[in-house]
Structure formats: C-alpha cells, structure tokens
Amino acid sequence: MDRRSMAWGFRPRVGHSRIGPLINSTNSNEEWLKLDDAAARFEVSRRTLERLRKQGVLPGVRIGRYLSVRTVDVERALARRSPLQIYRQQTQADAQLPTREWLLGWRPLLEGTPNLSSARRWVDCVIDMHGDTKLADLTVGDVVEVGRELLLKEDVALAFEALSGIARQRNMLETTRTMLKILVPAI
C-alpha cells in the first residue's frame, strides 16, 4: 500500500484489490441492483429491505454512496419473510430453468417443519430423477410417478391425490400456476 493511501486512512480489506471492484468473487452474470431499484422490482418498500439487511438476512455491498444487492439474495430474503413471495417467484419461473433450480425454490416452505418430511423427500426424489430436465418438459405424470414410488404421509397425501387426478401430460409449471391462482388469489 502506498503512503498516500495510508495518509488518507484508506485500508483495503484483506483479499480485495484496492483498485478492483469489491464484487470480484461473484459470478459476472448475476444481477446487482441499488436498494431503491430492488425495492421497486420486488414491490416492497426500501425500509423493508433495510430491515432485512439489519437482521443479517440480506447481504449487500456499498459501492460509492450506493448500497447494492444481488437479485438472488433479495429473492431469498423475501421468501423467508413471506410464503406469498415464494409463490410469486415460483409461478413466474422461466420454463427453460432446470427443474432442480425450480424445486429448490420451494425449499424454504418445507424446511424446519418436521411434519413436512415426506414432502421434502418427494421433492428430493423428483430432483434426483428429473433435476436436469427443463421445467418446460416436466409433466404432472413425472411428479406423480415419483410420488407413487414413495410412501407419502398425510402431509402431502392431499396434494398427491389432487395431482393424480390431473392429465399426466400436462406441464407441471402451468399446473402449479393454475392451482396457486385458485388457492392464493393474492398472487
């Protein structure tokens, strides 16, 4: 470090270049937004995002006078806050997304609740069998077939029965969108 930097009290963080960006350790195709832009995109107040940052749930980086956050981190933080945010995120998923990524998006609803253990097992088995399949190609029949092989408990028996009554060739993403619009009109 040169003496001028020391005179001004500048001390770069360990592992960060004095000249390079502070975000050099992340994937370059990730989207970063200023806090105000993230609030507008996710239809929440800036104060909500600030609260999540204060709670340690939403990481961010100060670049100049602006605080920037990754869109993926905002999605995760908001999903912890409200199941409605998870429903919105999952119904708006890109059909070209790998099934694995889409199913992992449901995890926050299933984690930490012991009575949903067979639901988690069902999701894990669908990931194992169809994780690399594009979401556009995942059918209700694929999901039902995996569920049939498991001994599902009451926590998901109703969901299994409902899916079993739907045409096997119907797309799972479209089915989920339709079902959630009926069950959760606020979406």
Image (spheres, rainbow, N blue to C red):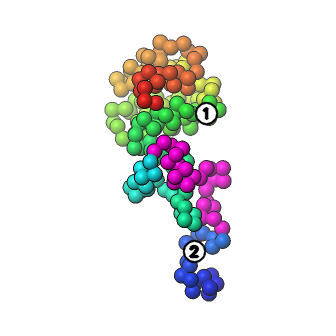
In the foreground, 181 or 44: 44
In the foreground, 103 or 177: 177
**What secondary structure predominates along the stretch shown in magenta?**
loop
Q: Which residue shows up at 56% across the image and 23% down it?
A: 174
Residue 186 picture location, percent across and down = 43, 30
Q: Is residue 116 above or below residue 50?
A: above
C-alpha distance separating marks 2 and 1: 39 Å
Residue under label 2: 12
Q: Is residue 138 above or below residue 7?
A: above
Please identify the quarter of the rendering in which residue 56 is found: bottom left
Tag 1: Cα neighbours inside 10 Å, few (<14), some, or many (≥20)? some
Task: Tell me if I can see residue 143 in this picture.
Answer: no
Please identify the quarter of the rendering in which residue 112 is found: top left
* Residue 51 shown in magenta: no
Please identify the quarter of the rendering in which residue 44 is found: top left
Label count reads 2
For numbered disc 2, what is the local secondary structure? Answer: loop
In the foreground, 99 or 90: 90
Residue 93 picture location, percent across and down = 57, 33
Residue range (magenta): 20-44
Q: Is residue 3 above or below residue 12?
A: below
Residue 94's label in the rendered image is 1
Q: Which residue shows up at 62% across the image and 30% down it?
A: 95
Q: Amino acid at mark 1?
A: Asp
* Residue 37 shown in magenta: yes
Residue 51 picture location, percent across and down = 40, 54
For the N terminus, give its image quadrant: bottom right
